[in-house]
Amino acid sequence: MADNGISRRRLIGTAGATGLALGAAGGAAGYAAAPSDASGASSTGRAASLTSLGTDEVMFHGKHQPGITTPVQSRGHLVAFDLAAGAGRKEAAALLRRWSATAERLMAGKATTGEDTDVARDAGPSSLTVTFGFGHSFFGRTGLEKQRPSALDPLPDFSSDHLDKARSDGDLWVQIGANDPLVAFHALRAIQKEAGDAARVRWQMNGFNRSPGATAQPMTTRNLMGQIDGSNNPKPSQDDFDRRIYVPASGAAQGPSWMAGGSYVVVRRIRMLLDDWEKLGVKDQEAVIGRHKSDGSPLTGGMETTEPKLEKAGADGKYVIALNAHARITRPDQNGGSAMLRRPFSYHDGFDKGGEPDAGLLFVCWQADPLRGFVPVQRKLDRGDALSEFIRHEASGLFAVPGGAAKGEYVGQRLLEG
């Protein structure tokens, strides 16, 4: 485990992270933070990066919570809790205090303070992040309705939704990510145990991404449809990044003071109808997306990061990128500049009774205001995205994720003790 005598690589922010290609199954025009560039082009560099994976550490305390701009990890768990009957603001504050202390220890590669399961005894931090958020119902349960942000109003209904209410929403939300499955599970189990009598699990989902070092050189990830997923992700180096992703401390878009430095996360479980999708030829798949499957480049030419030429027509006079192609509909400039930071995980939960894979995308996107980010794009997709025939939105949630905790504080303290 890492300690003060070991050099630690802080993975907060996206230094070295590249944008991912426009999503082929996300239902929004955001982009995902890429894995660390530690995967190195040479075999020697790759071997060195693999030996450092366990020692990579993300800091728990900071202006923003970890797990937002942290490069996506190879393993993820999403879990929502409901406060127990009779539990209120006092119990919620004690719970967030326990959770924050546990997250800080685990992210540093240390054991929990209680009876530890020893699942991750031999591992270091492995880029572990634990992120906490509050659902719409949390504020009524804790008597804090006046502190509930208007941006947390329930998402509108979409005609393509097939939502399972039992796997949607929740009072509290936790995102866990790590580059080692045992480290991620250890954190999940610790968080669940620390909930004690204060909260119970409402739903829980498991996801994965490509492991760092799996490719000879850093590459954009692919989703389970085989499409490169998420180019041109907003980068912290861009002037408008904070404005798009984080709630400001002042100004017209400020919101409640306890949300300063925080963000809003939309979570959608999107099943991919892979049997139907895989019946299409590659050319037809590319027409649905508007990008080449091989490298993610637009059908109008160029590279993965080349802007699509939406007005370009072919010899037949038709648009090269069809009017209902996913890449056209999700372009920010086709949606009033709506953009968000995508940070999804793929999932596979076995096979249904018909033998079809229950697999797809755990869509996770971050923005300063979901009513200006996710909602307008999803509405447009709902009206005529060619990809809609091959996906199904089965669960949904929206959560307010407060800013990071300062040293000695716990996440949400400004809300619960303000």
Image (cartoon, rainbow, N blue to C red):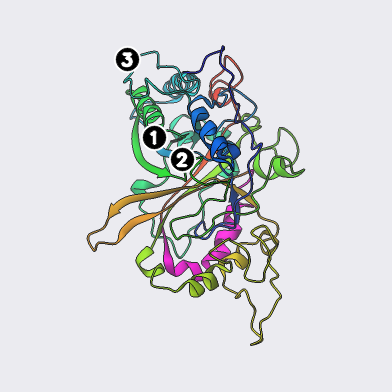
Q: Nearer the viewer, residue 46 or 139?
A: 46
Relative to 245, is 67 on the left or the right? left
Q: At 41% across and 44% down in the image, what residue appears? A: 207
Residues in magenta, as a range: 368-393
Q: Residues within 10 Å of mark 1 (few under 14, many from 20)?
A: some
Q: Is residue 297 magenta?
A: no
Q: Residue 164, which numbered label?
A: none
Q: Report the residue marked by disc 3.
A: 115
Q: At 48% across and 59% down in the image, what residue appears? A: 157
Relative to 318, is 183 on the left or the right? left
Q: Residues within 10 Å of mark 2 (few under 14, many from 20)?
A: many
Q: Nearer the viewer, mark 1 or mark 3?
A: 1
Q: Position of residue 227 (x, y in %)?
A: 51, 60
Amino acid, disc 1: Pro
Amino acid, disc 3: Glu
Q: Quadrant of residue 90?
A: top left
Whether label 1 touches label 3, CB < 8 Å? no
Q: Position of residue 257 (x, y in %)?
A: 66, 30
Q: Report the residue marked by disc 2.
A: 74
Q: Position of residue 140 (x, y in %)?
A: 46, 35
Q: Nearer the viewer, residue 9 or 168?
A: 9
Q: Circle 3 sits in a helix, a strand or a loop, which is it?
A: loop
Q: Circle 2 sits in a helix, a strand or a loop, which is it?
A: loop
Whether label 1 touches label 2, CB < 8 Å? yes
Residue 385 visible in the current orientation: no
Task: Answer above or below: position of 355 versus 166.
Answer: below
Q: Nearer the viewer, mark 3 or mark 2?
A: 2
Residue 8 visible in the current orientation: yes
Q: Report the residue marked by disc 1.
A: 181
Task: Point out the residue furthest to the bottom here.
Answer: 316
Q: At 40% across and 17% down in the image, what residue appears? A: 112
